[in-house]
Image: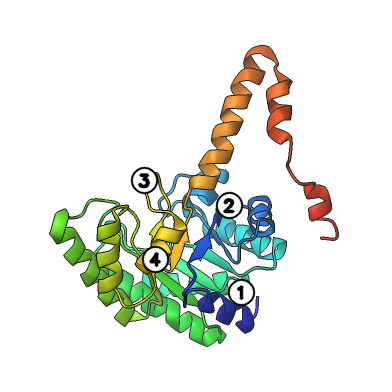
Amino acid sequence: MSQDDALAFRALHAGPKILILPNAWDAASAALMADAGAKAVATSSAAVAWSHGYPDGDALPAERLIATLECVVEAIDAPVSADIEGGYSDDPAEVGALVAQVIDAGVVGINMEDGQREPELLCAKIAAAREAAERAEVDLFINARTDVYLHRLAEGEAALAEALRRAEMYAKAGADGIFVPGPTDPELIARLVAGIEPPLNVMGRAGAPTAAELEALGVRRLSSATGPFRAAYAALAKAMAGFMTAGDAAALAALGQGLPDLNTRFSGR
């Protein structure tokens, strides 16, 4: 990916249209998403970790992450953003070094979360990531995720105040976008939009407004998170249960109908 790709990815957050951003976990899933019309593709840290046999939560070895990103970038023409969890380290210098590797893999955006750590630590990591991007001369889009709602670090008005406080801190540290997963209530989302200056990213989940409704509220980015992975593997688990119980290959064949020819899709690599 080039600086032009980085600028194109940044422009997708400028509105007025919302960026619908699917989250992939390998080359095949990314290709299907791009071929379905995705203007950009992000990875899901949980889905990538699970696909390699690791739990979510900074457990995936960095080399597995980088190898996955390289495969995703090579598989599609659209810009790629990487979910790097908490940076896989609490040492900002190590986070900066990882971000340099992520950029070398061809990625033009990252998502980094605070989890249950202190927000000051994420600020330091954001600053380190920005320094790495500047050294690489890439206009990296840094999306900072706050888990105030996801981890229930506060409730009610206190949660809103804390989310807004963290969003301001992360923006001052160098974040270009703010991701607040959890809220589905339109009124609350509207208050988040009003109180957060950078583009707001929300998570698609059951009960959440549609993309059109979020766009009308002023949300600029909608992430699928682990939804595609769960849908794919839930279908596989169901079909495998029938196959292993009775050797029912029909269910497997039915699931495979409509899948594009990936051998042709990846020919020439």
Instruction: Using the image as rendered, state which of residue 154 and residue 46 is in the foreground.
Output: 154
On screen, residue 82 versus residue 35, left or right, reads: left
Cα separation, mark 2 vs mark 4, equals 30 Å
- Can residue 52 be seen from the camera position used here? no
Give the label, 2 or 1, closer to the camera.
2
Name the residue located 49 percent from the left edge and 46 percent from the top edge.
227
Q: Earlier in the sequence, mark 4 or mark 1?
A: 1
On screen, residue 45 versus residue 244, left or right, reads: left
Quadrant in which the N terminus appears: bottom right
Name the residue located 55 percent from the left edge and 69 percent from the top edge.
102
Under mark 2, the amino acid is: Trp
Under mark 1, the amino acid is: Asp
Instruction: Using the image as rendered, state which of residue 150 and residue 130 is in the foreground.
Output: 150
Question: Which color scheme is applied?
Answer: rainbow
Give the label, 3 or 2, closer to the camera.
3
Give the label, 2 or 4, closer to the camera.
4
Q: Which residue is mark 2?
A: 25
Q: Which residue is mark 3?
A: 207
Q: Earlier in the sequence, mark 2 or mark 1?
A: 2
Q: Residues within 10 Å of mark 3 (few under 14, many from 20)?
A: few
Across and down, in percent, residue 264 comes to 84, 52
Q: Which residue is mark 1?
A: 104
Across and down, in percent, residue 224 comes to 48, 53
Residue 216 is marked as: 4
Q: Earlier in the sequence, mark 1 or mark 3?
A: 1
Please say if 118 is above or below 210. Answer: below
